[in-house]
Amino acid sequence: VLEVLRQRHEADLQAWGCAALRNLTEEGGADFRQKALEHGALELVLYALERHEAVAQVQECGLAALSGFAKGESHDSVAAGGSNGLRLALKAVKEHSAHEEVCRWALSALSELLRCEKMAEELGKYS
């Protein structure tokens, strides 16, 4: 999955790659999430969200993956990567307000990210 996300940048492939990562974060648990983070999966998801910010399917799947990576003990590792996820989730809610699933996953990602104190402090920069 990571190789496809690295090598192929078409919106549909990026969306499906992010969807696969989301499913794997759910099924694989904390160990999978940590290994995927160590192999750059989060950066690939954030890249897909930025590159295809106007494509609702990429936003939906990318934000779902971001939410999955931020679950449980992983949220500190995700927060260590910077505030891009927070910024992108907030932007998606604003730009895709008519797309229920994009908003749903953006709010899910925000909910998980804001469990980390560092990210809660970061949110103040966007208000």
Image: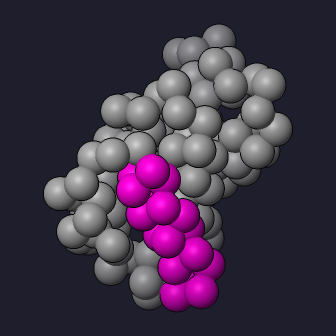
Residue 75 visible in the picture: no
Question: Which x, y percent locates residue 68?
Answer: 58, 65
Check residue 22 for magenta coloring: yes
Residue 93 or residue 101, whichever sits in front? 101
| Residue positioned 68% across, 18% down in the render | 94
Residue 40 or residue 100, whichever sits in front? 100
Answer above or below: position of 73 versus 28: above
Residue 114 or residue 89, whichever sits in front? 89
| Residue positioned 53% across, 16% down in the render | 125
Give the colouring mode of the picture.
Answer: one colour
Check residue 54 for magenta coloring: no
| Residue positioned 44% across, 87% down in the render | 31
* Count of numbered marks: 0
* Residue extending furthest toward the top: 127
Answer above or below: position of 49 versus 43: above
Q: Image quadrant of residue 64?
A: bottom right
Main secondary structure along the magenta-highlighted residues: helix
| Residue positioned 42% across, 63% down in the render | 17
Question: Which x, y percent locates residue 93?
Answer: 69, 27
Query: Which region is colored magenta?
Result: 12-29
Q: Quadrant of the C terminus?
A: top right
Task: Report the side of 84 relative to 55 (left or right).
Answer: left
Question: Which x, y percent locates residue 74?
Answer: 49, 67
Task: Report the side of 110 relative to 37 (left or right).
Answer: right
Answer above or below: position of 6 versus 20: above
Residue 28 visible in the picture: yes
Q: Quadrant of the N terminus?
A: bottom left
